[in-house]
Amino acid sequence: MKKTAASLTVSSMLLLAACGGTSPAASGTAGKQDTPAAKPADTKAADAGKPGEKKTLEFWYIDPGDKEKVYLEAVERFKKKHPDVEVKTLQTPNDTYKQKFAVAMSGGNPPDVFHSWGGGWLKEFVNQGNVLDVTGKINTDSYVKTVLDNATFNGKNYGVPLGLSLTMVWYNKDIFDKYSLKPPATWDEFLKVIDTLKQNKVIPLTLANQPKWPGAYYFMYLADRVAGPELFKGALGRTGKTFDDPGYVQAGKYIQDLVKRDAFNKGFNGIPWDAGQGRQLLYTEQAAMLVMSNSIVNNVRSEAPTFEKKLDFFPFPTVPDGKGDPSDVGGSSAPVWSVSAKSKNPDLAIELIKELSSQETAQSYSDRTGSPVGVKGVIYKDEFAKRLGVFAEKAKDIHWPYDQTLPPDLAELHKDTTQALFGLSMTPEEAAKKMEEKAKQILK
């Protein structure tokens, strides 16, 4: 990777729907543990202090399927190295996790090791003094610097990356073949594909936008394709560009054109991602395309493994007279493993995040989930991982999710106005004006 978007510096503890994370299906795994329920904070301290008894670490993450299996295998390797340590694991779906974690952190009873996305989401907890500084306790040379930097603030490390997630347009190859369609490279070609699918009673694009971040993928890509990466960097840094820039207005117009063309499934703004309804439309061939991070590969392998042979992807199309480079991609560092500053066993917790981001773990993660990683030394064997890795390497710019980058109130407004654009309840001009008015109040 050559460059990234502006460094992620601010976000909200109460951001309930940050982009880029993998969301599990409604498969009954939410809240499951491999050991009895976690103990309250006072007994956690007691666990750490009784001689001869096992020490306890709590580890929270969001991913199901093969990703979860990779994490749990890493936990087992850690336990073999540390037989005096018990690790209590808790898996919770994406959007629920964010709420649960914020409550645990504010209540003073967070897990020892936890999943994050780095960036502003993590920095908000860092600013509160709730995340352990691991500078000097990890080998920074083991990680891809660009990705590690997303958990580095003021020169200090607060987490280590495992996965690198890229957002693409995923599609059903069989449907495209059936109607003689080719992956579109331009917006006009994209619209022709949409129109052909509609004519044949196929939903062009499935969207589950109740949590708002899935629709934000479109907005961020369109803004980038229209005006290039300097649009967001400039608006965030207050260096000439603004959130009511014509580029943002045009991005909103493209979104509303798709809505008016009936490019999406009915009721998309009320459909939750975690429940899996949107993905089911893809699996059952009612819908042909999905704009999503490569977390969808893990979803497919967990929920509909026979569908994988039909799954493929192409980069987000260019737009007429757009200034954005077609090599630019949207990305997210996830998972990033961090340690709570309140951990009673910080050295052991650091050893656990090292195991969770080791080369062995990263190789297995890539092989089994089709994902690039932020760990050096991994040889991509999975075809999805190979191809995505090439896109990451060739990208002149990778834009990180806005809602993990912007200050809390502005991040929420970004998601609200984007959802309103999809709902046709706000014009692109109105959405852009609201964003800039709020930015003037918040950004310095």
Image (cartoon, rainbow, N blue to C red):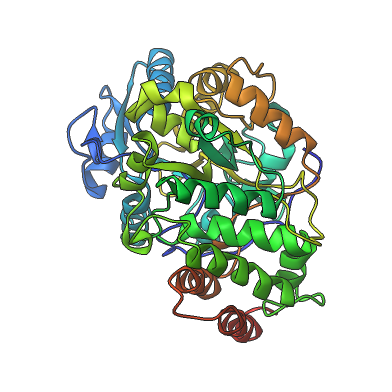
Q: Residue at x 46, y 75 (%)?
A: 424
Residue 354 visible in the displayed image: yes
Residue 153 position by quadrant: bottom right
In percent of width and height, residue 74 lies at 44, 21
Q: Nearer the viewer, residue 202 or 92?
A: 202
Q: Nearer the viewer, residue 238 or 190?
A: 190
In percent of width and height, residue 313 lies at 58, 35
Residue 183 position by quadrant: top right
In percent of width and height, residue 43 lies at 22, 43
The quarter of the rendered structure image containing the C terminus is: bottom right
Q: Where 378 sits versus 56, above or below?
A: above
Q: Residue at x 40, y 18 (%)?
A: 73
In percent of width and height, residue 182 lies at 63, 36
Q: Residue at x 35, y 42 (%)?
A: 281
The quarter of the rendered structure image containing the N terminus is: top right
Residue 138 position by quadrant: top right
Is residue 117 found left or right of 212 in the rendered image? right
Q: Where 107 sits versus 169, above or below?
A: below
Q: Where 184 sits versus 321, above or below?
A: above
Residue 129 visible in the displayed image: no
Q: Residue at x 33, y 58 (%)?
A: 99
Q: Nearer the viewer, residue 444 or 132?
A: 444
